[in-house]
Image: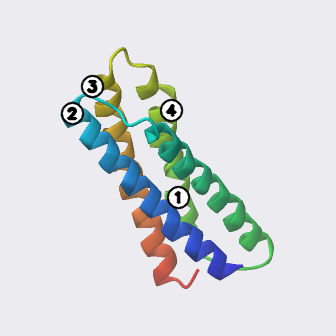
Amino acid sequence: MTNVHMWIGTLVVVAFVVSAILDVISFINGRTFTWQRMVSYTAATLLLLQYVLGLSLLGSGKSIPAVHFLVALLAIIPVGFQHGYASTRENAKQRSLYSAIANIAAVIIVLIAYMIGQNNGS
């Protein structure tokens, strides 16, 4: 199950990077892609799956430094900001700007958690 956790972690990082790129493009163009929201929700769902897998690994006796899952849990903040605040903005340019900021923050956070996990053999 550790390998599955590592692969899903890779997908989480990629999904947030793709979502951030789409938001930056949308901010520059002022238009959104019809499937952009689905990419964002996919990234958030993969993150949730990653939490479940991580907790299952902890429950089965695997150990990882506490900083790994504490940093990973921080990703909830930008994801919540994006889906709770940014998505309610009045125009597409504002939504894209706030979503891009949230996704870039999420990318940084999940990348740090990913690197900690990789360095500690999760």
Q: Nearer the viewer, mark 4 or mark 1?
A: 4
Q: Secondary structure at mark 1?
A: helix
Mark 2 is surrounded, within 10 Å at the Cα level, by few (under 14), some (14 to 19) or many (20 or more) other residues, namely: few
Distance from Cα at disc 2 to Cα at disc 4: 21 Å
Residue sticking out furthest to the top = 90
Q: Earlier in the sequence, mark 1 or mark 2?
A: 2
Q: Earlier in the sequence, mark 3 or mark 1?
A: 1
Q: Earlier in the sequence, mark 2 or mark 4?
A: 2
Q: Nearer the viewer, mark 3 or mark 1?
A: 3
Q: Is residue 78 visible?
A: yes
Q: Which residue is mark 2?
A: 29
Q: Secondary structure at mark 4?
A: helix
Q: Earlier in the sequence, mark 2 or mark 3?
A: 2
Residue sticking out furthest to the front = 34
Distance from Cα at disc 4 to Cα at disc 1: 18 Å
Q: Which residue is mark 4?
A: 83
Distance from Cα at disc 1 to Cα at disc 2: 32 Å
Residue at 66%, 80% (x, y): give it: 2
In x, y percent, where is residue 95?
Answer: 35, 27
Circles 3 and 4, Cβ within 8 Å, touching? The answer is no
Image height of 47 relative to 9, above or below: above
